[in-house]
Image: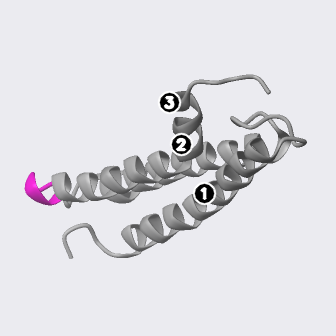
Amino acid sequence: MEKTAFTATFTGMMSAFLIWAVHFAAVYGINGLICARNLEGVDWYGQPAAVVLVLGATGIALLLAAGVLAAALWGAAPGRRASEDPRRFIRFFTALAAAGALLAILWNGLPALQVPACG
């Protein structure tokens, strides 16, 4: 079994949660800045600026989390070899974390798109 650094393996396993956390902070940061700076009336592409920015952040986060899920399912994640138990667990955990992060990102992003930023 080839050895990898604990930090690299742990970061790979937690990458989906890190993507979700950055998305969570971005969504609420965007809405907070829009309200604090009185930018509610600013429109981009015919939509409120908050909606466009949150939609962009949500799209990027979904793509990144889907990439983590794909990497875990196809064996490019921290645990590449399926024959060794610790690596199988790492891949399984990473895939479950990515699937959970996809749901959490949608859970955070959709209400922010449906409710006005300062409403």
User: Observer-nearest residue: 18 or 8?
Assistant: 8
Observer-side mark, 3 or 1, equals 3
Q: CA distance from mark 3 to mark 2?
A: 12 Å
Instruction: Magenta stretch: give its range.
Output: 35-39
**Outermost residue toward the right?**
83
Q: Which mark is residue 7?
A: 3
Q: Are marks 1 and 2 in contact (CB under 8 Å)?
A: yes
Task: Name the residue: 59% across, 34% down.
Answer: 9
Residue at figure coordinates x 69%, y 35% from the top left: 78
From the top left corner, tell me how far across and down residue 68 is, in percent.
66, 43
- x and y percentages locating residue 83 in the rendered image: 90, 42
Task: Please tell me whether mark 2 sits on a helix, a strand or a loop.
Answer: helix
Q: Looking at the picture, which amino acid does disc 3 mark?
A: Thr
Residue 52 colored magenta? no
Residue displayed at 19% across by 61% down? 40
Residue 48: which quarter of the image? bottom left
Are the residues at dot 3 and dot 1 in contact (C-beta closer than 8 Å)? no
Residue on which the image places disc 2? 15
Q: Residues within 10 Å of mark 3 (few under 14, many from 20)?
A: few
Checking the image for residue 39, the label placed there is none
Q: Which residue is mark 1?
A: 97
Image spot of residue 17 (x, y percent): 49, 52
Which of label 3 and label 2 is nearer to you?
3
Residue 4 vertical placement versus 83 (above, below)? above
In front of the other: 60 or 86: 86
The disc, 3 or 2, on the residue closer to the chain's N-terminal end is 3
Please state which of residues 7 and 36 is positioned toward the viewer in this rendering.
7
